[in-house]
Image (spheres, rainbow, N blue to C red):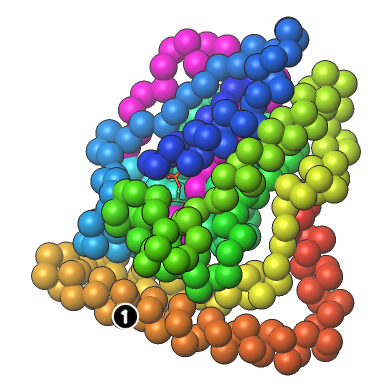
Amino acid sequence: MNNVLVVYYTQSGQLKEIVDKTTLALLQSQDIQISTYKIEMEEEFPFPWDFYSFFDAFPDSFLQNPKKIKPIPEDILNKKYDLILLYYQVWFLSPSIPINSFLKNEQAKQLLENSKVITISGTRNMWFLAQEKVKQLLKNNQAKLVGNIALVDHTTNLISALTIVNWMFSGVKKRMFNLLPLPGISQKTIEDSSRFGEIILSSIQNNNYTDLQQNLVDNGAVRVRPFLVSVDTKGNRMFRIWSKLIHPKQGEQRRKFLKFFYYYLIFAIWFLSPIVNLLYIVFYPFNYFKYKKQVKYYQGIE
Ligand SMILES: Cc1cc2nc3c(=O)[nH]c(=O)nc-3n(C[C@H](O)[C@H](O)[C@H](O)COP(=O)(O)O)c2cc1C
């Protein structure tokens, strides 16, 4: 019998849907016993979000400051796992505060130490540098990353930015203006993610993870668009400055800075990122080999 631990956090339920699809094959197997642990915060984040709470979460998200999580149940802690499936979402280009808090938690260290981990993210589309941060936290916990799946919203960057904000602030998945696509990861992408469970199952049964990532990539588990990597990298540079500036601020002053940050984000998304896109297209032939390397790197787990 193989013990598998599923660790996840979700606000809207999107990531739980992904858990359900990607573990279907494991649940149907006689050889596998799954334990599920949902991270719970001592102080929950609101969903739907209000304007202030959403932007107020930015400095701690980006600076990866952990918050208190509820103790991990004893029955989860007392088992030894052959594999851990870590499902996460990205907040402000970093692992979300609940995931970061889990990965920096002492009890979680006990679970992660010397364990094999597969990361499965469900994000808008900008997960590349957040995955680097997750990799580092896994390394700090002496866990071994053996696979990665990145599920995203495949609509264009600007449209998905509009629709996700509408979803996060209303709590309802609806077509904006009765025209734009539904926000978040498409139902088809979620449904089809069950095929990754079959690939993972085969690795568990053969106790061989050497080819797992390549098999996942061959089946479309990680699509890398160098343009988005470029926006993510530039965004991280700017967020570093903004987060350090806002983090120490309190009260009215903090509100004011968060508002400036909001204006900056609007400017960055609607003016800077199209320029980055244009430069990306113009200089594509000169950067062809660099981008090829980038795709290979972010599809990998090293
Ligand atoms: C505060 C906040 C910030 C977010 N920032 C990003 C981001 O930087 N990149 C990204 O791809 N998605 C981002 N998202 C979308 C989430 O990664 C995720 O897809 C969405 O919140 C649904 O996850 P859920 O399962 O927790 O409901 C953000 C969401 C929230 C609430």
Instruction: Pinpoint residue 99: horizontal percent, then vertical percent.
Output: 47, 42
As helix, strand or loop, the secondary structure at mark 1 comes to helix
The residue that disc 1 covers is 263
Q: Is residue 147 left or right of residue 275?
A: right
Considering the image in quadrants, where does the N terminus appear? top right
Where does residue 26 sit, x and y in percent of width and height?
Answer: 69, 20
Residue 81 drawn in magenta: yes
Query: Which amino acid type corresponds to the residue marked 1 in the rendered image?
Result: Tyr
Give the crowd class for mark 1: few <14, some 14-19, many >=20 residues within 10 Å.
Answer: few
The residue shown at (68%, 45%) is 149
Horizontal side, residue 264 vs residue 142: left or right: left
Viewer-closest of 198 and 71:
198
Residue 297 sits in quarter: bottom right
Residue 168 is a magenta residue: no
Tag count in the figure?
1
Eyeballing the image, is 245 above or below 144?
below
**Residue 201: x, y in percent?**
77, 24
Specify the segment rendered in magenta.
68-92
For ligand 1, tell me if the residue under mark 1 lies within 8 Å. no
Residue at x-position 83% and y-position 68%: 293
Residue in the image at 62% along x and 31% along y: 21
Q: Is residue 202 left or right of residue 45?
A: right
> Is residue 178 visible to the viewer in this orientation of the structure?
yes
Image vertical order of residue 298 relative to residue 112, above or below: below
Residue 234 on image: x %, y %:
55, 77
| Nearer-the-camera pick, 133 or 169 | 169
Residue at image point 48% right, 41% down: 14
